[in-house]
Image (cartoon, grey):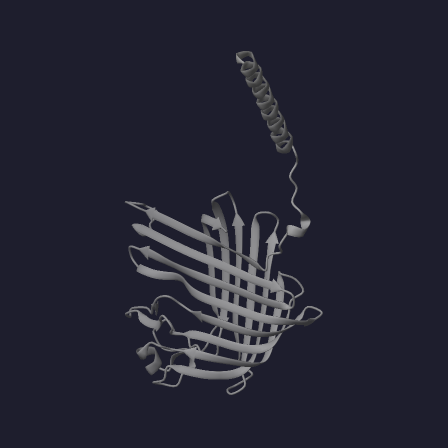
């Protein structure tokens, strides 16, 4: 009986070891297999999102410097550009948001702004064939902080503020978009609201609003041309030109807003950017050196920066 039990136990152990060895071999075989993704499992993304952040900082200090200059100077500029593009079937929705703020501080001049911008653009379209879309456009532009003009031998004069001005555009038309880089929006039916929320600026009738009012309604034709291009592996250009003609008041006076940004990646975290903005609006009066009000003039802004950058 005892011999029988020993034999039975031996057979059980051998069977268990063989079974375990077979399981181990099976696991090794399965682990060595190449796993490939079924192409049918690939899901196309409807949204393409991204953007970049750029921060530029400059500082200088002088002491007994014979060449002359301010004792100290400090400047800081920040720019955030975001985009979200949607495409599914015949529906397309393009959204961009551009935020910028910069200031300069010097011993002799104190604090002054170098950049201040809020710009939201949204276009929704339905494909009607051959790269043309029946579209609606919404655009909002304003700034973050008060702006001043500095006439000679006079105190600074307030020229702008948050929501003073602000421009809101709502247009219906067609959009030609042959690719993700280029688009032209044309609208013969566009409503534009010019907002001047600051009471003192509204009282002066700044930016074309009637004196004492805060909003001016305009109705006319609008065109917006957008272009963005990746240049090589390190540079990105983004440009936009907006044109508006008011049917209700001097339609021959066309308002122009143009922005150009060239961002170049120098290293993984260091970048260079060049910005050129041009604005012309017949309702925006200039300020002369002696503080008197002048006629409308082209507004030109050029910015160059070398600083930290992050792309996402």
Question: Residue 250: image x %, image y %?
Answer: 52, 86
Front-most of residues 156 and 199:
199
Which residue sits at x=32%, y=72%?
158
Residue 283 visible in the snapshot: no
Check the image and report above or below for 196 versus 12. below
Front-most of residues 55 and 154:
55
Q: In this view, does 65 lie to the left or right of 231?
A: left
Query: Which residue is depicted at the point 54% across and 55% down?
Result: 262
Image coords of residue 254 (percent x, y): 54, 78
Residue 32 position within the rendered picture, expressed as x and y whole percent measured from the top left = 64, 31
Q: Is residue 283 above or below residue 299?
A: below
Q: In which quarter of the image is residue 90?
A: bottom right
Q: In this view, does 303 lie to the left or right of 236?
A: left
Q: In this view of the protein, which residue sits in the foreground, 205 or 42?
A: 42
Residue sitting at the far top = 3
Look at the image and tell me whether residue 37 can be seen: yes
């Amino acid at each position: 009986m005892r011999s029988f039990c020993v034999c039975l136990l031996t057979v059980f152990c051998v069977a268990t070891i063989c079974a375990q060895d077979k399981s181990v071999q099976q696991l090794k075989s399965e682990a060595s297999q190449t796993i490939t993704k079924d192409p049918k499992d690939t899901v196309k993304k409807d949204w393409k999102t991204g953007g970049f952040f750029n921060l530029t900082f400059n500082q200088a200090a002088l002491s007994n410097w014979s060449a002359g200059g301010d004792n100290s100077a400090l400047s800081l500029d920040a720019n955030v550009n975001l985009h979200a593009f949607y495409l599914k079937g015949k529906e397309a929705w393009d959204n961009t948001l551009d935020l910028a703020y910069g200031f300069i501080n010097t011993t002799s001049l104190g604090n002054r702004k170098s950049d201040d911008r809020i710009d939201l653009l949204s276009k929704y379209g339905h494909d009607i064939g051959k790269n043309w879309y029946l579209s609606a456009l919404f655009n909002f532009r304003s700034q973050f902080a008060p702006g001043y003009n500095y006439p000679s031998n006079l105190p600074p004069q307030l020229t702008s503020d948050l929501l003073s001005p602000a421009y809101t555009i709502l247009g219906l038309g067609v959009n030609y978009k042959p690719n993700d880089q280029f688009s032209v929006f044309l609208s013969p039916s566009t409503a534009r609201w010019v907002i001047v929320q600051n009471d003192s600026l509204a009282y002066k009738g700044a930016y074309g609003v009637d004196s004492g009012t805060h909003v001016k309604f305009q109705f006319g034709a609008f065109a917006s041309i957008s272009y963005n291009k990746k240049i090589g592996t390190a540079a990105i250009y983004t440009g936009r030109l907006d044109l508006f003609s008011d049917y209700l008041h001097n339609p021959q006076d066309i308002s122009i807003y143009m922005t150009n940004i060239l961002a170049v990646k120098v290293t993984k975290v260091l970048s260079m950017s060049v910005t050129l903005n041009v604005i012309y609006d017949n309702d925006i009066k200039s300020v002369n050196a002696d503080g008197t009000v002048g006629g409308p003039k082209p507004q030109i802004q050029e910015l160059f920066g070398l600083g930290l950058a992050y792309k996402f």
